[in-house]
C-alpha cells in the first residue's frame, strides 16, 4: 500500500511556475536565512520571518519581512510582485521599511524550475547588473540569490542569498 502511495505522489505533476499562480509555492509563513555582502567584502548573516499573501485578485503577491528584536519583531520591508499576462512576467518592487524607500521596477520570468531576472543600477563603485534567481523550489524549501557584475570588471559578486524554509 505504501508503495502505491509513493508512486502516486511521484507521478503528481509539479506546480507550474508560469502564469499568475507561479508564485503560489511561496504563500504562507517562512523562515529566511539571509547573507548579504558588506562594503568590506565580509557577509552579514541574519534570520527573519516572512509572511506571504496574495493580492490583486490573485495577480499579485506580497511578502512582508520581520526581524527579531528585543521587543518581539521589527518590520523591515516588503517585496511586491504583480503578474503581467501580456508579457508573461512578474513586475517586482522592494519597499525598504527602514529607509521608507520604494525601489525601481524589475522583472522576473519563469525559467527552468525557478524564476530569473536582472536589475541594472549604479552605486559608489559604478554601474552594475544584478542577476536574481529563485531556484531549488520544493513545497518546504527554496533558495534565492543575487549576483552582481560591475561594468568593466570580469568578476561576479554574490551580493545576497536567502534560504527559505516553510514554517506553516
Image (cartoon, rainbow, N blue to C red):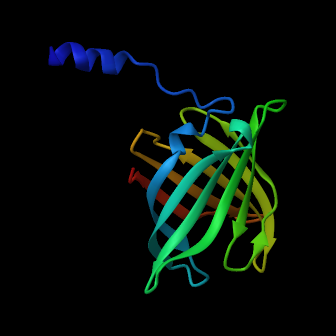
93 to 7, vertically: above or below: below
Labels in figure, total: 0
Tell me: 23 left or right of 139: right
* Whether residue 159 can be seen here: no
Q: Position of residue 71 (x, y in %)?
A: 46, 85
Q: Position of residue 7 (x, y in %)?
A: 27, 15
* Whether residue 102 can be seen here: yes
12 to 124, vertically: above or below: above
> Which quarter of the figure has residue 72?
bottom left
Give the camera-side residue of 36 and 156: 36
Residue displayed at 59% across by 61% down: 64
User: Going by the picture, which residue comes out furthest to the right?
Assistant: 86
> Which quarter of the figure has residue 164?
bottom left
138 to 149, vertically: above or below: above
Residue displayed at 65% across by 44% down: 116
Residue displayed at 46% across by 19% down: 13
Q: Position of residue 15 (x, y in %)?
A: 51, 27
Q: Quadrant of the N terminus?
A: top left
Tell me: 4 left or right of 161: left
Residue displayed at 67% across by 79% down: 98
92 to 109, vertically: above or below: below
Q: Position of residue 124 (x, y in %)?
A: 78, 80
Amino acid at each position: 500500500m505504501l508503495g502505491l502511495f509513493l508512486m502516486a505522489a511521484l507521478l503528481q505533476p509539479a506546480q507550474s511556475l508560469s502564469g499568475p499562480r507561479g508564485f503560489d509555492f511561496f504563500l504562507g509563513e517562512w523562515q529566511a536565512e539571509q547573507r548579504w555582502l558588506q562594503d568590506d567584502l565580509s557577509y552579514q548573516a541574519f534570520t527573519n520571518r516572512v509572511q506571504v499573501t496574495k493580492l490583486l485578485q490573485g495577480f499579485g503577491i506580497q511578502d512582508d519581512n520581520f526581524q527579531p528584536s528585543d521587543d518581539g519583531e521589527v518590520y523591515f520591508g516588503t517585496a511586491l510582485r504583480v503578474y503581467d499576462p501580456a508579457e508573461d512576467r512578474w513586475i517586482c518592487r522592494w519597499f525598504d521599511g527602514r529607509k521608507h524607500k520604494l525601489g525601481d521596477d524589475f522583472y522576473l520570468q519563469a525559467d527552468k524550475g525557478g524564476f530569473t531576472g536582472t536589475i541594472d543600477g549604479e552605486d559608489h563603485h559604478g554601474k552594475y547588473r544584478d542577476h536574481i534567481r529563485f531556484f531549488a523550489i520544493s513545497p518546504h524549501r527554496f533558495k534565492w540569490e543575487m549576483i552582481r557584475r560591475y561594468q568593466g570588471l570580469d568578476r561576479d559578486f554574490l551580493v545576497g542569498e536567502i534560504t527559505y524554509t516553510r514554517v506553516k
